[in-house]
Image (cartoon, grey):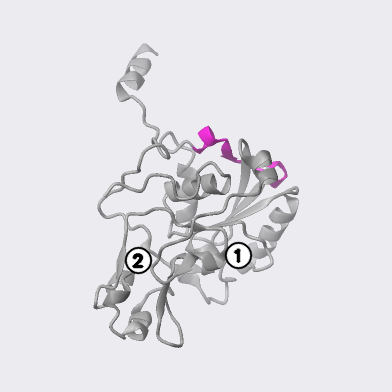
Amino acid sequence: MLDFLRTRLAQGTRTSAFPGEAPEFPERFRGRPTLDGARCLGTCRECQAAMPSSLLVVAPDGRASLDVGACLFSPEEATACPHGAISFTADARLSARDRPGLVSETGELPAIEALGRRMQQLFGRSLRLRSVAAGSCNGCEAELVALGNVVFDMARFGIQFVASPRHADGLVITGAVSRNMRDALYRTYEAIPDPRMVIAVGACAINGGPFRDSPEVGNGVPPDLPVDLWIAGCPPHPLTVLDGLLRLLGQLDGQSAPAPKA
């Protein structure tokens, strides 16, 4: 026992200082995509056809924008533009309150509006979530599990996952919502008592991800489920999920959290 205590003291604090300090990511980390309009040379439709996802959106007039919610964060999405107009930043803040908020001409996302005062009073200090993997590759689930480890320690903010929807305040949905999981998803939602929230996590839950338009999936969360927070990523980094949740709960004001270190 003494050896264990000595080892733990030598290791020091392992928990991330986020949101008090800027997070550090590996050099190869791909965060929020960005679009440099000055580099677009009229070949957007060709770039769009070369994309492995629907990240690049081209309007009828030829103007391009980025759908961050559809992004798979693959290197092929950046190299699809031969002029280098698309690149990835180290910014892990990838959440929006509504689906259109994940689409912009530059990739920049608006500040998240926190829940109303009553909802903040209810959930701001104690939020219990039930997760449903509705047909995914389990990448998003692995990142959600990581939120409970000593590094991210989501529980220090009063947020925890629970086993039963009847003990939950909200529903976290991952996966493209397969036909086999659709009924289970609705049953879980209905079992959560009001007031409740819905959080869509990952490209699959947002628009079907790499499985989009497959006859076996519903291209993400059904439109009749009211989503309160959309968190992009494939899969999203644990700090991406945590950042979105804290902003939703009003524990982070606007974009005041420190940006990632360059």
Residue at 35% across, 42% down: 22
Residue 169: name its quadrant: top right
The x and y percentages for residue 56 are: 40, 75
Q: Dot 1 surroundings within 10 Å: few (below 14), some, or many (20 or more)? A: many
Q: State the SS at label 1.
A: loop
Can the viewer see residue 74?
yes
Q: Which mark is residue 221?
A: 1
The x and y percentages for residue 257 are: 42, 44
> Is 65 left or right of 120, judged from the image as shown?
left
Q: What is the three-letter code of the residue carrying label 1?
A: Val
Q: Dot 2 surroundings within 10 Å: few (below 14), some, or many (20 or more)? A: many
The x and y percentages for residue 80 are: 30, 76
Which residue is the extreme one toward the top? 2
The residue identified by callout 2 is 34
Residue at 37% across, 12% down: 2
Residue 166 magenta: yes
- Closer to the chain start, of discs 1 and 2, is 2
Count the marks: how many?
2
Q: Identify the magenta region.
A: 154-167
> Please, is residue 255 above or below residue 39 in the view?
above
